[in-house]
Image (cartoon, helix red, strand yellow):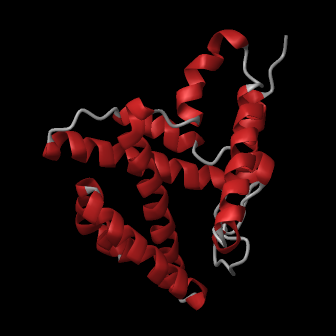
């Protein structure tokens, strides 16, 4: 029997983000997912080392890799539309859930259950899911910073909005506050300044 899961997941590279914005460099879903994965992993490590938590950093990293996989089926809906009102937000969540179920249906029965917790939030891993969502916001902030650094003013308003959201997350999640303070400023540097 053949299964389409990984061939479908590999199509993330064809889904471009920020469709309504003029980009100096396009970002695809694969790139974004890698960034979210690395940031989510780091947030869990910070939580474990500095705040004596027992977070599953590997789980967060893998969840970050797949967190937007449903967009292979749904496409990347722009945030202003996705969150325009509660009805649209709920309808889109339902569509995402169906898309995730369709993706999971492309796996063999004997390994499918290992992926369910990655695609669907569980109470047991609720905090890790919050950190993945925070990593998603941090990735968006970094994208805005990178675009702004090239002189693209298209992302100025998005950066303001996302910065406020990240600041609010930092009030709730100390890992985010630490990451912002210690790592985000480096994204404004040039390659020579990083060396």
Residue plotted at (43% across, 55% down): 135
Residue 72: percent from the left, percent from the top? 75, 47
Residue 122: percent from the left, percent from the top? 47, 33
Left or right: 73 as drawn, with respect to 150: right
Q: Quadrant of residue 195?
A: bottom left
Position of 61 relative to 82 (above/below): above
Left or right: 48 as drawn, with respect to 115: left
Position of 173 relative to 155 (above/below): above
Q: Nearer the viewer, residue 122 or 118?
A: 122
Position of 13 relative to 124 (above/below): below
The single residue placed furthest to the right in the displayed view is 1
Left or right: 169 as drawn, with respect to 161: left
Q: Quadrant of residue 126?
A: top left
Q: Nearer the viewer, residue 40 or 99?
A: 99
The single residue placed furthest to the front in the displayed view is 87
Residue 4: percent from the left, percent from the top? 80, 27
Residue plotted at (53% across, 86% down): 157
Residue 125: percent from the left, percent from the top? 40, 34
Residue plotted at (32% across, 47% down): 42
Q: Quadrant of the N terminus?
A: top right
């Amino acid at each position: 029997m053949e299964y389409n899961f990984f061939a479908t997941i590999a199509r993330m590279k064809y889904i471009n983000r920020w469709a309504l914005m003029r980009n100096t460099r396009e970002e695809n879903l694969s790139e974004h997912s890698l960034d979210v994965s690395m940031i989510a992993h780091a947030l869990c490590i910070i939580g474990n080392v500095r705040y004596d938590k027992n977070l599953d950093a590997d789980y967060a990293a893998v969840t970050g890799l797949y967190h937007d996989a449903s967009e292979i089926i749904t496409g990347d809906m722009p945030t202003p539309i996705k969150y325009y009102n509660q009805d649209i937000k709920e309808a889109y969540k339902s569509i995402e859930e169906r898309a995730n179920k369709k993706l999971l249906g492309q796996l063999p029965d004997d390994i499918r259950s290992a992926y369910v917790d990655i695609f669907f939030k569980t109470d047991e891993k609720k905090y890790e899911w919050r950190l993945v969502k925070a990593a998603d916001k941090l990735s968006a902030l970094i994208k805005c910073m990178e675009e702004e650094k090239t002189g693209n003013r298209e992302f100025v308003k998005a950066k303001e909005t996302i910065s406020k959201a990240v600041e609010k997350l930092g009030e709730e999640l100390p890992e985010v506050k630490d990451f912002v303070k210690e790592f985000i400023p480096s994204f404004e540097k040039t390659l020579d300044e990083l060396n």
